[in-house]
Amino acid sequence: MQEAAPRSPERFAFGQNWRRFIDDVDDGRIQEAEGSLSSMLGLTDLRGRSFLDIGSGSGLFSLAAARLGAGPVLSIDYDAESVATTREIKRRFLPEADWAIERGDVTDGSFLARIGTYDVVYAWGVLHHTGAIWHALDNTCRRVGEGGILFVSIYNDQGRKSRAWRRVKQRYNRLPQLLRPPFAVAVMLPFELRSFTGALIRCNPGKYVREWTQPRRRGMSRWHDLLDWVGGYPFEVARPEEVFEFCRDRGFELLRLQTCGGSSGNNQFVFRRREPIP
């Protein structure tokens, strides 16, 4: 088994960000998460299917899977604060669920071999933050049981723009803690002004306000997503065809693809495992 990949000391505190998000989680956000998950999977009911959430973060999507009937559910995350946040989400919303939560590293082949395979493996916005994206994706593929489903999202490769964002993220994580939020605001202010101006031109400023005050797509929070974007390091990217070819070569067929239209967001892939992984 391959050893875990070394982790960069310049690493965003993902768990701290999720811990601050937890008090925003309510029925509306949970329903948004359920709808997002079932829509991409093409399944409204996960009963009878085991579910592995790699990089559970807040635990919102593990909760969504459990509420859709999945079981057993296993949430793993490298960040101890994310693990604690996921446990708190379970305690608050679904303590009786068949749902285990562990600290674990997706780059650690020995750990992953111990947890076995699952009917649905979910790794949304996680693998590109490991510092070893292809090693992590290979390990993730190996957790999918025969005929199982892999739902993964990975940052889109924009070439020079992606390299520029990597430098921004490194700078954020080198700053003292107190300077990081104002730095994030300064970085994103031009983009936010453009969004607000566009809303004014369309005579719909309320839409911009709602994006800050109501659950985002997937039940997320705009402020916590903003911090995650500016600070999220390590930061790796991939072209959609690279992800497709990588998974195809490991016996997967593509069921659904949702790209971010060439922007800096995530491309989302849903695969089914059809053949043994070489």
Image (spheres, grey):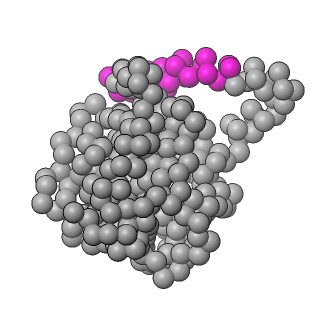
Which residue: 53% across, 51% down? 257
Residue 188 at x, y = what percent? 56, 22
Residue 131 at x, y = what percent? 27, 39
The quarter of the image holding the C terminus is bottom left
Work out whether residue 94 or residue 251 is closer to the camera in this orientation and state it.
Answer: 251
Which residue: 69% across, 25% down? 195
Left or right of 267: which side holds 206? Answer: right
Count of numbered badges drawn on the protein? 0
The quarter of the image holding the N terminus is bottom left
Answer whether residue 85 is visible to the viewer in this image. Answer: no
Magenta run includes residue 225 = no
181 w.r.t. 130: above or below: above
Which residue: 21% across, 67% down? 113
What is the quadrant of residue 84 in the picture? bottom left
Work out whether residue 79 or residue 179 is closer to the camera in this orientation and state it.
Answer: 79
What is the quadrant of residue 159 in the picture? top left
Residue 127 at x, y = what percent? 35, 47
Work out whether residue 138 or residue 213 is closer to the camera in this orientation and state it.
Answer: 138
Answer whether residue 136 is visible to the viewer in this image. Answer: yes
Which residue: 26% across, 57% down? 139
Region in magenta: 173-194
The residue most toward the bottom is 48
